[in-house]
Structures are given as structure tokens and as C-alpha cells.
Amino acid sequence: MKYGYPPLIIPVFLPAMGCREHCLFCNQKASVGNLPSPVSVRSFIEASLPAFPSERKEGEKQIAFYGGSFTAIHRDDQVRYLKEVQPFLAAGLIDSIRISTRPDALGEETLSLLKEYGVKTVEVGVQSMIDEVLFLARRGHSVADTVDAVSRLKDKDFEVGLQLMIGLPGDTLDRFIQTLDRVIELKPDFLRIHPTLVLKGAPLEDLWKAGEYSSMPLNEAIQWLKKGILKLEKSSIRVARIGLQPTNELKRDYLAGPYHPALHQLVDSAIFFDMATSLLQRVPKNGQALFFCHPREASNLRGQRNENILKLKKDFNLSEILIEERKELPKGFLGLRTQKGEVSVERRFLFH
Ligand code: SF4
């Protein structure tokens, strides 16, 4: 990550622009007709720039064209939008551009255009590396399209982010793990992973209403994501986000599915629950347990509303669980004091 900080992003949403397909899970078609004009994009950027926090001057500043498939819209429109950003790049107010798009809309000519106009980061909607899942999700592209697009993006030195989904029709935990294996081979710079939600206006709504699709329970999503995150940590691919941003649109359109505004934190808490369990299984209990960890991991160990502590007490018949915060410990580490000394576990060794 350049500058050692996550980028500061001004997001410009171009809903469903360029979408040839109507993907099963997506309700963005509902927004067509409200596309911003290139000129309004410039005003939006001007209005957004002062909001960049001054104490993060060293963070890379990006304009992101999110929403539909940027590179699938007409070439002239891509150029119009990209041109609006050029004065900000030239003045040093913005460092680079990021776009999101589909794997089958990244031909050689398109990549040259993106380079020419200062696009640095390309986020690709991969969703799954299983062709049957892509077909059932009506994506209109194949796994081979993704492999081809990512390798060409990397050849041209773009920063590559991939978006994956869990819980689409035909998806299984095994298929999700296979997807991660294939994605790790592609060596992207970062990933986003979103559970499938049923949204008003998406074709999936009809399947769900007809009883032909059941959304994944939140607990199951956490278990899948826990396995996935631990696997990815071994590969050192950064996970930029888990779960959709809590927006007003999401609040308005959400019908069903494993949504939680702090999903990543729930997954980390589930990982710490497993770590604590593995330690408690290794030592004789005497009614009390004293764990130690980095101060920033204490909340992961406790879990939301102290859930981990309550469950560990019940599972191991403990009257009290104490947590000692030790600044010198690395993150991802958990120790337990025993009568004979101390035992510990690191989250990076948890996946098998
Ligand atoms: S998921 Fe992306 S490609 Fe599919 S309809 Fe929505 S915006 Fe278009």
C-alpha cells in the first residue's frame, strides 16, 4: 500500500452504467436515469476535496468511479468522465483514479485508455471462481474471463482489487474455498468479500419470494468468512472490506441476508473465540481463566456484548474470565496463564 495508509477515496457512483447483464443479486438498474453528468462530477469532486482529513496528508488521494461497469460504457463517455478528473491530477489535489468494472470489459484498448488518463486501481467484480455459480448469478462472464483480465491488468502494473461474494445460488463453503485458492493464485493486491443480500428490485427478490432461494444465516456467513480470512492471511493478500457499507440505500432496499454493519469485527471475534477455545482445551481448568493479548484485541476476545466470554464460561464451566492487556504482544496473539506457566496461540496458525 503506497504511503503506508489506506487511500482516501472520493466515491463517484455511476449506477448500472454499461451493464449488459442484470446480475441476479444487483438492484442497480432501479437507479438508471439518475446518472451524473461529467460536469456535475467535477463539482462533486470540488465540493468533496475539503473533506479529506488534513492529518492524513500522506495518504494517497483517489477519485473512484464505483457502481456499474465503468469500462463497459461507451468509450466517449469513459473519456468524458476521466477528463473531468485531469485538472485535479495536474494540480496535485488527487493522486490517481480508481474504477470498478466487470472482468469481460477489460480489453487491451481499454487498459491503454485507463493508463493514459491516470487510472491506477481497477476493482474487478469476480464474485466467484466457479462457472456454475457465475451462470446462476446471471453474470454473463466466465472464470476464464477473470483469469485473463487479472493477468493483463497485472502485466500493465495496475493495482488490482477483486470483489467476491458468498452465498450466491449454487455456492457452498467448499466452492468458496476453491474460489479463494484460485484468487490467491492470481495475486491481487486486495479483496473485498460481500455476503449475498436480497435487495428490493434485484431479480433475486423474486426467487426469494418464490421460496427458491434461502439467504444465508448471519452465523453461517461468519463461519465461512472466518475460514476465508484465515486462509487469506496466510497468503498476505489484504482484505479491504468484508460486507457492504451501511448506506441509506442499503437500509431502504434490504430484505434478507447476512447483513451486519460490523461484519469484519464479528469475524475477528469468531476467530478469537476459536483461539480461546483451543487454549482452554489444552489446560486443566480451575474455575477461572486469565487471558492476555494486545490491548486492541481485547474487544475481539470479549465479542460483541461480551458474547465470547459468556459462551466460554458456559462451555468450560468457568466462574470468571479475566483479560490482561499487554502492549508488547503482537496482534493476532492470545495467551492463557496456567498453574504451570503460560500457553499461547497465534491466529495465523489457526487455518488448516
Ligand atoms: S452487479 Fe455490476 S455488472 Fe451486474 S448489474 Fe450490477 S452493476 Fe451491473
Image (cartoon, rainbow, N blue to C red):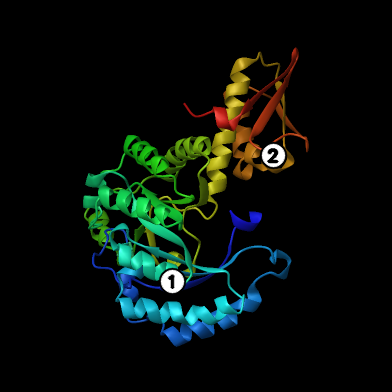
Q: Is residue 126 above or below residue 247?
A: above
Q: In this view, does 250 lie above or below 346?
A: below
Q: Is residue 114 left or right of residue 278?
A: left
Q: Nearer the viewer, residue 112 or 169?
A: 112
| Picture quadrant of residue 57 | bottom right
Q: Position of residue 191 (x, y in %)?
A: 46, 50
Q: Which residue sits at x=44%, y=77%? A: 82
Q: Is mark 1 on a helix, strand or loop?
A: helix
Q: Position of residue 199 (x, y in %)?
A: 35, 62
Q: Where is residue 348 in the image (x, y as percent from the top left)?
A: 57, 32
Instruction: State yes or no: Cβ of the residue under disc 2 lies below 8 Å from any atom of ligand 1.
Output: no
Which residue in the protein does label 2 denote?
298
Q: Is residue 318 above or below residue 37?
A: above
Q: Which of 160 and 173 is in front in this view?
A: 160
Measured Cα–Cα span from mark 2 to mark 1: 47 Å
Q: Is residue 67 visible?
A: no
Q: Are marks 2 and 1 in contact (CB under 8 Å)?
A: no
Which residue in the protein does label 1 denote?
116
Q: Which residue sits at x=28%, y=68%? A: 19
Return the disc, 2 or 1, that comes first in the chain's sequence. 1
Q: Is mark 2 on a helix, strand or loop?
A: helix
Mark 2 nearby-residue class (10 Å; few <14, some 14–19, many ≥20): some
Figure quarter occupied by ligand 1:
bottom left
| Picture quadrant of residue 334 | top right
Q: Is residue 117 left or right of residue 279?
A: left
| Picture quadrant of residue 305 | top right
Q: Is residue 231 above or below residue 261?
A: above
Say what amino acid the circle numbered 1 marks.
Glu
Say what amino acid the circle numbered 2 marks.
Ala
Q: Can residue 272 be seen in this view?
A: yes
Q: Which residue sits at x=37%, y=67%? A: 112
